[in-house]
Amino acid sequence: MSKISDVTFAGGSGTEYKFQAYTTDTRFKDVGAVYIFSKRVVGSNGGTHTPRYIGQTDSLSDRIPSHEKWPCVEKNGGNCICVHVDSDEDSRLDKETDLRAAFDTSCNEQLKEEYEMTPKNFEDLDKAFSRKVVEESEASRRGDKHTAKQAKKDQEEIIRKKDEAGGFGPPKTGRITHATGGGAK
């Protein structure tokens, strides 16, 4: 691994998380971690990291090399992988959620920004819900439990937003309680 530096990122709660920054060509061991693809800029006062994508995995060696967000990360200047090793999935998910609350990353789907709905645009909300159902199903088929779980949470958030706006229940596509083929529930 080609370690560059130590980095601290603060989550939306104010909790600080210590990461190690590596070059993008680093080959990682089979360990669980929260990771941030960042744009590192070095100036006279040291380096700064701007998160481009925040995620978590139970295996860096499996997840990082073929990550589906690499094209977006590279397009947005990502040149570092920051790693916070954590073997506990619930802990990783909590940390990822906290960090995503603090940063408006260019490559994470930010539900709170993307789907701010009003009663006038329920059709857009229904389309967003359908996209999340497909995302959950595809992630389940790939065995990507984290993405499937996040897509499910996003579906619930979309339904909540529609209800708050007076949308009279779930989107027209209906509420999916399980996906076929992937075993997600």
Image (cartoon, helix red, strand yellow):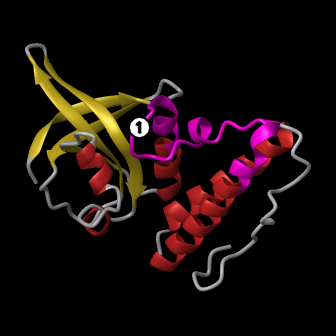
Q: Magenta stretch: residue 114 in it?
A: yes
Closer to the camera in the image, 160 or 99: 160
Query: Residue at (29%, 47%) from the top-left corner?
Result: 73
Q: Magenta stretch: residue 150 in it?
A: no
Query: Residue at (80%, 57%) from the top-left corner?
Result: 171
Closer to the camera in the image, 5 or 121: 121
Q: Is residue 48 above or below residue 52?
A: above
Query: Residue at (23%, 48%) from the top-left corner?
Result: 74
Closer to the camera in the image, 29 or 96: 96
Residue of label 1 = 105
Q: Image quadrant for the N terminus?
A: bottom left
Left or right: 152, with 174 as reference point: left
Q: Residues within 10 Å of mark 1 (few under 14, many from 20)?
A: many
Q: Is residue 43 above or below residue 99?
A: above
Q: Which element type, helix, strand or loop, lies under badge 1?
A: loop
Q: What secondary structure is the stretch in magenta mostly built from?
A: helix
List the single residue furthest toward the top: 45
Closer to the camera in the image, 111 or 149: 111
Total numbered badges shown on the rendered structure: 1
In the picture, residue 120 is in which quadrant? top right
Query: Residue at (65%, 83%) from the top-left corner?
Result: 180
Across and down, in percent, residue 108 comes to 44, 46
Across and down, in percent, residue 13 comes to 53, 27
Left or right: 37, with 175 as reference point: left
Across and down, in percent, residue 31 comes to 30, 62
Q: Image quadrant for the C terminus?
A: bottom right
Across and down, in percent, residue 26 comes to 13, 56
Amino acid type, callout 1 = Thr
Q: Which residues are magenta?
A: 97-126
Left or right: 156, with 133 as reference point: right
Q: Is residue 11 above or below residue 122?
A: above
